[in-house]
Structures are given as structure tokens and as C-alpha cells.
Amino acid sequence: MGKKLIFGAVVGMFAISYGCSSGAGTTAYSLEDFEFPLESTNVANGTEVYAEFCEGCHPGGEEGDGPKISDAALSPAKVRWQVRVGGKDMPAFGADKISDANLEDLLAYTATLGTVLR
Ligand code: HEC
């Protein structure tokens, strides 16, 4: 019994440290990677992407589990960064969840809220 517990603890510790080192799988982004103009005007698709991934914490751009983001007037690069890298209490959304094209449409929608500048 005692041995089993110790074995479990060792496996658990290995799993945790392995999990941390493989956390390097998170792509290292620099803000410059995101410095390009916002060209999408596909607000309709952006609304759907927002509803699926953002609405829960920023309802209609207002405060929820996340802060109010309407009228934040951020650069497109800053918002792309925020979505891809996440924050302290905001999850990161990789291209597996929100494709580059969907991210641009998402920004077109958030531009209508004043979150992102065109
Ligand atoms: C689980 C809740 C949660 C979800 C889902 C979420 N956010 Fe956030 N968001 C936050 C929190 C909390 C912050 C405040 C900063 C932090 O803790 O990272 C934030 C900050 C932001 C900011 C920065 C605001 C500023 O004034 O600097 C932007 C922009 C933003 N979120 C956009 C989005 C978008 C777009 C999505 C959808 C792809 C999204 N968020 C999904 C919780 C969330």
C-alpha cells in the first residue's frame, strides 16, 4: 500500500515536470508577427466566431468573466496577440481553434464594438 502511494507520487511528479517542459510547444510569438493591416470585412462570420469563443467572458463586448473590451481601441496586432497568446486569466486560442482567416473575421466584428481599430 505504502509502496503504491510512493509509486503514484513519483509518476505524478514525472507527469507534472514532463507537462511543463513540453509546455514549450506554445509557439513563441512576438508582437511584430501580428503587425499587418486588418483587411477582413466579414463581420457575419466574425460574429459567429466571437459567439463561440469570446462571448462567454466578454458578453457583447461588456464585462463578464473578462473585462469590458468594447471601445478599447487596441491595435489589430495587440488583439491578435491577446487571442493567440492569452493572458493571466484568458486562455490562448491557437490556429487549431481559431484559424488565421477566422481570426481576421473576428477582428472585423470586434472593430464594430470599438475593441480594435481599423
Ligand atoms: C475565460 C474567459 C475569457 C475568454 C473565453 C476570452 N477572454 Fe478576453 N480576457 C479575459 C480576461 C480575464 C482578460 C483580462 C486580462 C487577462 O487576465 O488576461 C481579457 C482580456 C482581453 C483583451 C484585452 C483588453 C484590454 O483592454 O487590453 C482583449 C482584446 C480580449 N480579452 C479579447 C478576447 C477575444 C477576442 C476573445 C475570444 C477569442 C476572448 N477575449 C476570450 C477573459 C476571457
Image (tube, rainbow, N blue to C red):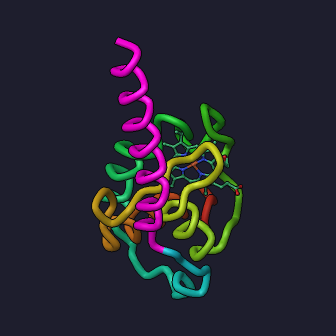
Is residue 45 among the parts visible in the rendering?
A: yes
* Residue 52 in magenta stretch: no
Where is residue 108? Give x, y as percent: 45, 66
Where is residue 4? Give x, y as percent: 33, 21
Q: Residue furthest front?
A: 3
Where is residue 105? Give x, y as percent: 37, 66
Q: Main secondary structure of the magenta part?
A: helix
Q: Quadrant of the N terminus?
A: top left
Q: Residue at x 47, y 34 (%)?
A: 56
Query: 81 or 55: which is nearer to us?
Result: 81
Q: Residue at x 53, y 40 (%)?
A: 60
Q: Residue at x 48, y 50 (%)?
A: 17
Q: Place residue 61 in its image quadrant.
A: top right
Q: Place residue 67 in its image quadrant.
A: top right
Is residue 118 among the parts visible in the rendering?
A: no
* Relative side of 36 to 74, left or right: left
Where is residue 68? Give x, y as percent: 67, 43
Q: Residue at x 39, y 76 (%)?
A: 40
Query: 2 or 67: which is nearer to us?
Result: 2
* Residue 14 in magenta stretch: yes
From which residue to which does the magenta span run? 1-27
Query: 24 or 49: which is nearer to us?
Result: 24
* Relative side of 100 to 68, left or right: left
Q: Residue furthest top?
A: 1
